[in-house]
Amino acid sequence: MIDHDRLFKELLSTFFVEFLDLFLPQVASQIDRDSIQFLPQEMFTDVTSGEKKEIDLLAQCRFEQQDTCFLIHVENQSYTEKVFAKRMFKYFARLHEKYDLPIYPVVIFSFDEPKRPEPQIYRVTFGDFNVLEFQFAAIQLNRLSWRDFLTQPNPVAAALMSKMNISKQERPQVKAECLRLLVTLKLDPARMQLISGFVDTYLRLDAAEEQTFQAAIDTMGLTQQEEIMEIVTSWEQKALEKVAINLLREGMASEAIVRVTGLTVERVQQLQAQLTQEN
């Protein structure tokens, strides 16, 4: 199972300003970027169903050249839900009650299907009397064309192209383009790994697609090819390490794991030490 909320929270909290620049430039232009701070995760209980819900990301920002603050609430929705707009209103009402600050609510719809536009308004009416009309900003990834983001020098674009409107035959090309854009950004290794891992999670390729992916990389410049292959090699290393960890848990001898995975003796010993510490 993919932990969608964790992956998106990690991506957006690391590249929050870049996310605003890419999708909400009108908001980005109004904030003091040095003032951004993430608030503790809020937990709400739905009194109707009894379910506990946790909001994904809540940032407090100051308006540029002002002393007043506001909140940006970002929610990732990885599946379609009829009552989602109502739930967003409940989040808004409770956050507004607690913090008494203006709130800018944003939703990233990150599921693959359906591709119809998702509702982004919650209304309460009596006849022709409009009691309430609450709306939130919506970014529905499966209705965005990945081609529109190819030239965006933005790490969030490099990651989220992998969740946009992609046909099956385009998957290898999109993965290659995500990595091409990523290597042009010259990020530090940790941030590079965050985005490349995000892309690999959502664009896992079969054997035939891997061949097409490699062919797409081969058409790029030599430097880009080398940097992309370093990322691919790191994916393969992580996959082998996962296999090794599972075999260690099953009690297989280290020497046999070295033969099966091709990892070095030293690396298998390190993984064994990590497991011992965890236990």
Image: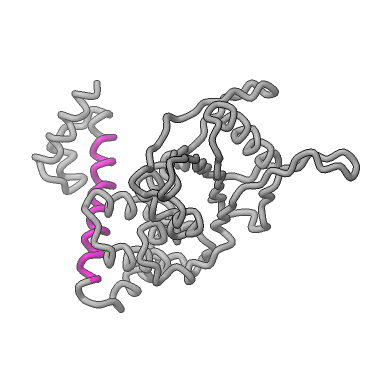
Q: Is residue 9 visible?
A: yes
Determine the image quadrant of residue 241. Answer: top left
Give residue 170's position: percent from left, percent from top.
47, 69
Residue 132: where, in percent of width, then height?
A: 75, 40
State the quadrant of the C terminus.
top left
Residue in view at x 60 percent, y 33 percent:
91
- Residue placed furthest toward the left: 266
Residue at image position (25%, 46%) is: 240
Q: Which residues are magenta?
A: 224-246
Extreme residue in the front direction: 66
Relative image position of residue 55 (x, y in whole percent): 51, 34
Image coordinates for residue 64, horizontal then vertical, percent: 42, 50
> Is residue 167 at least partly visible in the picture?
no
- Seen at 52% across and 26% down, the residue is 43
Q: Is residue 227 magenta?
A: yes
Please tell me which residue lies in front, 275 or 249. Answer: 275
Magenta run includes residue 54: no
Residue 277 in the image: above or below residue 79: above
User: Taking 216 as reference, is 244 left or right?
Assistant: left
Q: Main secondary structure of the magenta part?
A: helix
Q: Nearer the viewer, residue 64 or 113?
A: 64
Query: Which residue: 21% across, 32% down?
Result: 252
The answer to whether residue 176 is left or right of residue 243 is: right
